[in-house]
Image: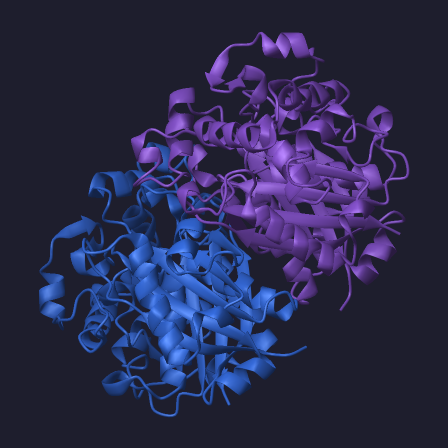
Chain colours: A blue, B purple
């Protein structure tokens, strides 16, 4: 079967976007992706929207976005798998092309979170955990990941310094990304002095909610080669699940869904973990990035802490990770994140990432987690 | 490319299901579909969930259902396009198989609506209309469709008797469906005497909210032939959109998205409207079924009223429509409806519909509308 290629990418600024509705955010990213591809809107056969609908006053979000982008009467559908919704949109868009159903598909991750108060957001997010036995008794997202962190520290001797090095790295690169929410470097001392959130986490261990959108335009192999002189190939699109309740997981020091999805994505793309030069991983909390290094096979189990302090995930190390700032510094508009990750990898593989460019980036990866790891989507991307 | 076949179908009772959670409803339908297919759960490669998540206290619905069905660590994703969410799930499941990504996929439409009060449901549904200029000023779903009805009556002389004949027919058949919410026939007189809802609609013009689930298991052509001795082929899977705001539509006497999707589905399956022997159409209100006859080309524009009173859509007429009771009598658990429609057509094409069997049913169709027609999904199904 033929490959599916990325022919256009677009991105808007992440942050408190009180200047724009969710469909306006989607349009910003879509317009940029069309310009980037050098194609007219008429060439788009369908769109896929990655978003978690209930954060928006206006529902039927796919229809609203489709009309605002001028894509009516073409088909659209929305995918929702919590914070991995954007990657599920990517994956179904890939399917639509491979299935021969559509030729050119626009994938739009978009999310407006700041229509709601922080309390409302927390209440909604809690419901993404297991309601009956976990979030119903007060478990929050920081609480879940804090448990992972405590266990990782206990089993492997991971330290606070190692955890916070993730934040330092991602802020270092976020400062170089014009679309990032936080465009400032932080020191380890500053991070260590920040307010406590959920032991062992302090403020700088946690990513921030944001509004934002990103767009990726996909096309079948022949059309991609025709339209683009620098197509990036989406050669692995794997997904896996784990139990909703973390209590039913085999362990708390990684995500079984991520291990499974990574194994399948590598096999599908015919690569090894060591082939990956640049990766976007789901650093909703510092420990999540450290677990991702291990789940993706970038280093051995328990070695994630030293891996980052040894600068193996900085540019120049074994694999550059989250050099757009990651969820931590770029911000996390939940439905947009998976598409934003893909945007950054395409940018890197095309050699257009400017001062955050990873040298010789020929194979890239995205790792997008939904909920507390009940979903994980892993993509492998290659350039010619 | 190869065809995609239906190898198993399952359905639960629609209604106020205070006996079951949404994942339990999903399990009922899934278990029946596995039994029907005669396969073990291990053979399922992935699931797709059709649902509108925000009606449920527990979010991350795909993950919850996936775990409850025992399908972890296989992939899952949820599709949402309002009341057509089940058909979008069907369509992405079809894509996954045609794309060579998965071999056997379970599509589960499931929805628990009665966790919420009627006022809460109305508030949520309103947001599926255009919030800024329409539902924000009080337009409700019955209000939208009442406008369509008034206009249809004005332009084509459609009568109250013709509209209510849809309800009489669908209750007549719903009485024969063990899964239907309302299992009783009604007379035209009774319908005409019912309470007013939104002029010209009375109670019997409107479908009812319900809890419920349905499941369809899809497989690639070779596997479908191996597993099933009566596969039903999903040969057309078209979708289209129309503007969110009905004020921006070219007319109010039909759904442009339905016309477009029907044209594409017929072309994809290589059939004409007159080839269709049995159809499930989206009769959320009586006028919606009459518009569907016309949009699908079963009769000419404006002829839908006489078409039903001439009994052309009863069994024995030109095309049997909603002989499972339709949304009207079967009930409308929004995310489940599209999958339930597919269930009924598969049942009919296999000749297993008992006292509501349509003779010589070899080609069937589903027509599933999302919102006020901003989405329409049309499927064409065939037996060997």
**Looking at the image, residue B181 lies above or below residue B235:** above
In x, y percent, where is residue B71? 62, 48
Q: Residue at x 55, y 68 (%)?
A: A94
In x, y percent, where is residue A39? 44, 78
**Looking at the image, residue B356 lies above or below residue A117:** above
In x, y percent, where is residue A307? 32, 76
Q: Quadrant of residue A318?
A: bottom left
Relative to residue A176, is residue A32 drawn left or right? right
Pick the quarter of the image with the N terminus of chain A: bottom right
Relative to residue A164, is residue A37 drawn left or right? right
Work out whether residue A379 can be spotted.
no
Work out whether residue B94 can be spotted.
yes
Total labels drawn: 0
Q: Quadrant of residue B292?
A: top right
Q: Residue at x 30, y 43 (%)?
A: A140
**Looking at the image, residue A79 lies above or below residue A185:** above
Q: Residue at x 58, y 40 (%)?
A: B68
Q: Nearer the viewer, residue B102 or B369?
A: B369
In x, y percent, where is residue B51? 53, 41
**Looking at the image, residue B206 lies above or below residue B219:** above
Q: Nearer the viewer, residue B174 or A336?
A: B174
Q: Nearer the viewer, residue B210 or B298?
A: B298
């Amino acid at each position: 079967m033929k490959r599916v290629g990325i022919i256009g990418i677009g991105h808007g600024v992440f942050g408190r976007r009180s200047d724009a509705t969710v469909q306006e955010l989607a349009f910003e990213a879509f317009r940029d992706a069309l310009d980037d591809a050098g194609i007219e809107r008429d060439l788009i056969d369908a769109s896929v929207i990655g978003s978690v609908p209930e954060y928006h006053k206006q529902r039927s979000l796919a229809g609203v976005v489709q009309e605002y982008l001028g894509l009516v009467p073409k088909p659209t559908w929305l995918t929702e798998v919590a914070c991995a919704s954007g990657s599920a949109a990517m994956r179904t868009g890939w399917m639509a092309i491979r299935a021969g159903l559509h030729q050119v598909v626009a994938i739009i991750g978009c999310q407006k979170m700041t229509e709601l108060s922080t309390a409302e957001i927390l209440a909604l997010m809690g419901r993404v955990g297991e309601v009956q036995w976990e979030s119903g008794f007060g478990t929050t997202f920081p609480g879940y990941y804090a448990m992972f962190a405590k266990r990782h520290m206990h089993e492997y001797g991971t330290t606070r310094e190692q955890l916070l090095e993730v934040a330092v790295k991602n802020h270092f690169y976020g400062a170089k990304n014009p679309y990032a929410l936080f465009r400032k470097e932080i020191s380890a001392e500053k991070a260590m002095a920040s307010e406590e959130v959920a032991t062992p986490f302090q403020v700088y261990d946690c990513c921030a909610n944001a509004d934002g959108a990103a767009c990726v335009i996909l096309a079948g192999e022949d059309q991609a080669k025709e339209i683009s002189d620098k197509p990036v190939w989406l050669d692995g699109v794997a997904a896996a699940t784990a139990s909703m309740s973390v209590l039913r997981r085999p362990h708390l020091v990684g995500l079984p869904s991520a291990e499974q999805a990574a194994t399948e994505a590598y096999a599908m793309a015919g690569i090894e973990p060591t082939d990956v030069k640049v990766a976007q991983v789901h650093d909703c909390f510092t420990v999540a990035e450290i677990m991702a290094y291990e789940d993706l096979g970038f280093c051995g189990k328990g070695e994630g802490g030293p891996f980052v302090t040894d600068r193996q995930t900085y540019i120049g190390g074994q694999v550059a990770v989250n050099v757009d700032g990651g969820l931590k510094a770029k911000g996390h508009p939940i439905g947009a994140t998976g598409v934003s990750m893909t945007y950054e990898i395409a940018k890197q593989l095309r050699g257009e990432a400017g001062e955050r460019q990873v040298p010789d980036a020929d194979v890239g990866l995205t790792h997008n987690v939904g909920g507390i790891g009940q979903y994980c989507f892993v993509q492998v991307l290659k350039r010619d």
